[in-house]
Image (cartoon, rainbow, N blue to C red):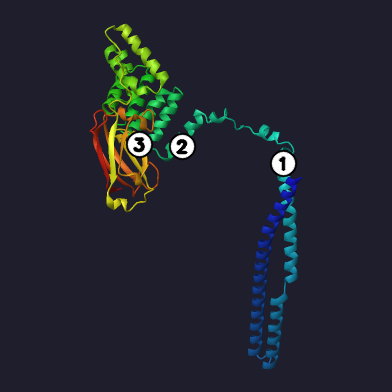
């Protein structure tokens, strides 16, 4: 009952909102039109009187008398002429609107609405063809994702990230030939990106029934020159070496990989099993004690800002201190966040500061270390940010301390 009361009140308000402008607009337009017609008729009658006076059909006294009558009639017409007709039309229009809107609203709701839910809310869940549940959340199928990615690429065919995402979608569906095409396009647009090189090598190998020899292994080695400790690259390089029956190289690659995946127990267990199998094939191979994941991947940084730029920024401004690959992905490999008031500061960047588990500081030999005052508070650099960077820092053998002074404006 309460629902219908609210519905009636809302319909009444809608009628008021609709009718007032409608009646006012209609009345104003009709009045204007009627007045213009009366004025035009009066002008024509005046011209007739002037013609009759000029031709001698009436004298001046007759003209003056007729002209006064004409002015009086025009004044009366402008004051009240057509008012009853306009009121009648306005009433009919208001009546039509007042009848049609409520009747149509109720009729449409009864046809397309679900009025039974008012008395029985359980019907709401039953009526929904796609219930919102945790289990149903992944119903964004791979096919739907593929369609969205392809729409994105139609709008921007030079989107390297989009092609990479499409390649991953194709790999998930075991459509390896299409994945190769997508990864190749991404590689053409973003050359010397290790992650893309390794993904392309993997897709080529899967297309050839898992065979990594030939072009796939060449791509892996190309990627490892850029990122010698990239986990996926070391994994694929070990697989290729094993297929060539070069068990020593495979053992070396997987031993290097072991500390880089220490935070993934399942992968660690699998690699240890594969190393054990290699040692059974070649008893001379032994698994040396793996170094800790953070060994050789700890960069000490001292960061400050010039007095001139400090005066131009709020003490609450966000400061990011980061390390990124000299050649490779543009996103930081390690990052720490602080405020301008914290400077000067000393800190360490290591694998524990990675933004993504697969992209670690220890995965790249040469890195750039930098600091940036972000006025947006976001990691993405924007015009107007203050920054500084120092390149060619060895992640395995860094200097005792990298000194940074923020003194540039982007």
> For the residues marked 3 and 1, what is the alpha-carbon distance in whole angstroms?
58 Å
Q: Residue at 33%, 21% (x, y): give it.
A: 259
Say left or right for 50 vs 313.
right
Sort mark 2 into few (<14), some (14-19) or many (20+) by Cα contacts within 10 Å: few
Say left or right for 310 vs 49.
left
Percent from the top left, x then y, of residue 9? 72, 52
Front of the two marks 2 and 3: 3
Q: On screen, 197 above or below 214?
A: below
Q: On screen, 63 above or below 319?
A: below
- The N terminus appears in which quarter of the rendering? top right
Seen from the viewer's position, the closer of residues 258 and 128 is 258
Tag on residue 111?
1
Secondary element under disc 1, as helix, strand or loop, is: helix
Seen from the viewer's position, the closer of residues 330 and 206 is 330
Percent from the top left, x then y, of residue 66? 70, 87
Front of the two marks 3 and 1: 3
Q: Residue at 73%, 64% (x, y): give it.
A: 89
Q: On screen, 346 above or below 45?
A: above
Tag on residue 151?
2
Tag on residue 335?
3
Percent from the top left, x then y, of residue 388? 28, 43
Dot 3 or dot 1: first in sequence order is 1
Q: Can residue 246 be seen at all in this image of the molecule? A: no
């Amino acid at each position: 009952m309460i629902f219908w009361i609210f519905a009636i009140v809302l319909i009444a308000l809608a009628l008021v909102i609709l009718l007032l402008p409608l009646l006012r607009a209609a009345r104003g337009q009709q009045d204007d039109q009627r007045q213009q017609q009366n004025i035009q008729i009066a002008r024509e009658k005046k011209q007739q009187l002037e013609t009759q006076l000029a031709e001698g059909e009436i004298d001046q006294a007759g003209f003056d008398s007729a002209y006064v009558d004409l002015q009086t009639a025009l004044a009366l017409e402008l004051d009240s002429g057509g008012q009853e007709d306009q009121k009648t039309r306005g009433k009919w229009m208001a009546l039509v609107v007042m009848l049609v809107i409520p009747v149509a609203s109720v009729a449409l709701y009864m046809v397309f609405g679900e009025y039974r839910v008012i008395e029985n809310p359980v019907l709401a869940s039953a009526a929904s063809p796609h219930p919102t549940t945790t289990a149903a959340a992944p119903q964004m199928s791979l096919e739907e994702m593929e369609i969205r990615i392809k729409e994105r690429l139609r709008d921007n065919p030079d989107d390297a990230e989009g092609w990479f995402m499409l390649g991953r979608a194709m790999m998930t569906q075991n459509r390896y030939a299409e994945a190769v095409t997508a990864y190749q396009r991404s590689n053409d647009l973003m050359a010397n990106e290790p992650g893309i090189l390794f993904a392309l090598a993997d897709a080529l190998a899967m297309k050839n029934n898992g065979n990594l020899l030939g072009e796939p292994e060449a791509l892996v080695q190309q990627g490892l020159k850029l990122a010698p400790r990239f986990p996926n690259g070391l994994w694929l390089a070990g697989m290729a070496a094993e297929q060539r029956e070069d068990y020593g190289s495979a053992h070396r690659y997987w031993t290097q990989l072991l500390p880089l995946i220490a935070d993934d127990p399942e992968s660690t267990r699998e690699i240890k099993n594969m190393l054990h199998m290699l040692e059974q094939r070649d008893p001379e191979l032994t698994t040396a004690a793996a170094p800790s994941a953070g060994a050789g991947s700890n960069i000490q940084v001292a960061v400050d800002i010039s007095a001139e730029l400090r005066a131009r920024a709020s003490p609450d401004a966000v400061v990011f201190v980061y390390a990124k690959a000299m050649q490779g992905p543009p996103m930081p490999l390690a990052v720490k966040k602080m405020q301008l008031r914290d400077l000067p500061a000393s800190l360490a960047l290591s694998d524990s500061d990675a933004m993504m588990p697969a992209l670690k500081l220890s995965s790249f030999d040469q890195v750039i270390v930098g600091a940036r005052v972000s006025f947006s508070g976001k990691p993405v650099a924007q015009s107007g940010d203050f920054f500084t960077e120092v390149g060619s820092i060895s992640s395995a053998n860094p200097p005792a301390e990298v000194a940074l002074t923020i003194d540039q404006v982007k």
